[in-house]
Each structure stands twice: as C-alpha cells, then as structure tokens.
Image (tube, rainbow, N blue to C red):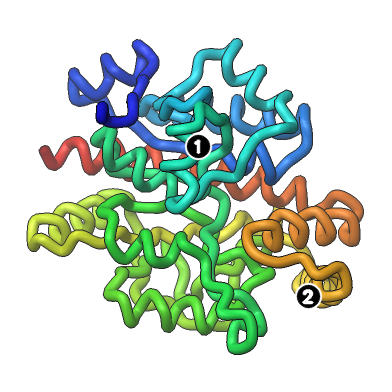
Amino acid sequence: MPAPRLRSTPEVKAALASGTPVVALESTIISHGMPYPENLQTVQEVEALVRAEGAVPATIVVQDGEIRIGLNAEALERFAQNRDLLKVSRRDLPVALSQGKSGGTTVAATMICARMAGIAVFVTGGIGGVHRDSEQTLDISTDLTELARTPVAVVCAGVKSILDIPKTLEFLETHGVPVISFRTNEFPAFFTPASGALAQVRIDTPEEIARCMKTQWSLGLDSGIVIANPIPAESALDENLVQRAILDSLDDAKTQQISGKEVTPFLLERVNQRTQGQSLQSNAALIRNNARLGARVAVEYQRLG
C-alpha cells in the first residue's frame, strides 16, 4: 500500500530544499477554535508575522485525504470557510487519509506531519493537557503523549487554562519532555501570563532555545520540547474573570454530557461567550506573539546547521 501523500506548496518545498527556516502552524484553531472570518484573519496575520521574521509559514491541514504542508491564499480561505471539517489527532490520521476526508490538525497530528516534512519548529496557541476531574474521566490530551515521542519544538502560550495545569506539568516531567518558559519564572496559563506553577527552566533568548533543541536531539532524546511563551500583559484577561468563566463552562459541559475531543472546543466557545468575546481577542493576540518567537527560534536553529 502506498504511503500517505504529503503535498507541500512550492514555497514550502523550496524553503526546505534551500535550508530556509520553516515554521509549522496547526489548523484546528481555524477549523474548531475560531469562527469565520476571525479564523482566516488570524492565520493570515500569523503567516505574515512568520515571514517578517525571516521564516516561511506552513499551515498544516488534511485535505481530501492528503496531508498538506502549507496552503496558498485561495485554499486557505476555502478551508477557513468550511464548517464541516474533522478534528484530526493521531488516532484520526489513518481514517481521515484513507477515506479522503478533510480536517484541522491538532497539536499532536501537526507534530507528526511536521516531523514527516522535516520541520523542527511548530507554533500553536496552547497545548492540550490533563483535564480537570481526570481522576474520574481519564481524559488526557494526546498532545502530551505526542510530545513524549515526536522531536518537534512546540511554541505555545502554555496549557489551555481550562485544563489542570499542575497535573499536565507532572505528566510532561514523567515522560521526560523539557518545558522551557520564555523570559518568565512561571509557567504561563494561556489567557494569563502566570499559572502559579514554577517554570522548569527559564530561557531568555531564541538563540539559547535553539541550542537547547540542538543539544537534546543530538543526544538521541527523541521527545518534543515545550516552549511556553506568556501572553503579552496588555492582551491578558483578568484571572478571576477567566476562572469564573471556566468553572461555569465546565458545569455546562457536565450537564450536556460533552466528552472526548469535543470538550476543548465546547469549553473555549463557552468561555468566549462568558467573557463577551474577550477570550477570542486574547487567543488571537497570543498566537501572534507565539508566531514571532517561533520564527525567531526557527531562524536561530537553522543557523546552527
């Protein structure tokens, strides 16, 4: 049986061939994280920021049974307008590809596809983690197990604050995943710059982060790396507002018996409603901030050869 087809845009293909830094971008923020047209506007801004820092953006999607590494402007707009897309994680890739489906790739699936394409740096909003009440539900994001086995650096604003952050950090520690906090002594909490959990290690420059990546993988340690980049203070939400919105949204999820991979998009939508759209604006701001850092890290990593 032939291997799944990996189709790159000419821009991405040329960049990889010439050694130009490339930054992978996930697509569930387009398909499930934001409504149209905010999703399209955000990804266009993110791609422009990556280019401005000297790297080439590669938004990764599953389209008609193919893994697409990068999309041209027309294809990106069509994808952003499509409201009938799967949410594709590791377990969903074989089904989506073999059945000719289309969908947005989660952090886990994007890591897999980026690794297949030879891309070392990946930018997202926030990673998944251990869900609250995981003692009863055993709900732990595949993002975490992917980080334990796929050597890609993931730039994020920390763990989504709807999750159990201390348990998530414990899980990553158990599985040997380095967690770097950029210019902060605390691990960030997505909508807010601090979570109350101390950072494993603080690193203050993209150059140092790139050296850490290079060193880890030269040792044969084939796990990913979390690069936690706090949301800018001017875009952060009030912590009390966020916590109230999260707790009320968790109650809604229980009442409506929302489970599995539907939990996170449901909670994010409810939190956005309860913050009167503020969380959506913060989400866009933090991923733009992550794009700048991710591109700078990719440039420095490429310089190391």
Q: Secondary structure at mark 2?
A: helix
* Near-viewer residue (128 or 233): 128
Q: Is residue 134 above or below residue 193?
A: below
- Residue at image point 55% right, 30% down: 101
Q: Secondary structure at mark 1?
A: helix
Name the quarter where the C terminus is drawn. Answer: top left
15 displayed left or right of 290? left
Q: Position of residue 122 (x, y in %)?
A: 40, 44
Q: Position of residue 43 (x, y in %)?
A: 60, 31
Q: Position of residue 94 (x, y in %)?
A: 42, 42
The type of residue carrying mark 1 is: Ala
Q: Which mark is residue 243?
A: 2
> Disc 1 or disc 2, which is closer to the eye?
1
The type of residue carrying mark 2 is: Gln
- Residue at image point 45% right, 53% down: 91
Rounded to the nearest angstrom, the CA distance separating label 1 from label 2 is 36 Å
Q: Position of residue 79 (x, y in %)?
A: 63, 24
Q: Is residue 27 above or below residue 74?
A: below
Counting residues from the start of the chain, the first of labels 1 and 2 encountered is 1
What residue did someone put label 1 on? 96
* Near-viewer residue (231 or 88): 88
- Residue at image point 43% right, 66% down: 144
136 displayed left or right of 248? left
Label 1 CA crowd tier, 10 Å (few <14, some 14–19, many 20+): many
Name the quarter where the N terminus is drawn. Answer: top left
Q: Is residue 223 above or below residue 22?
A: below
The extreme bottom residue here reads: 135
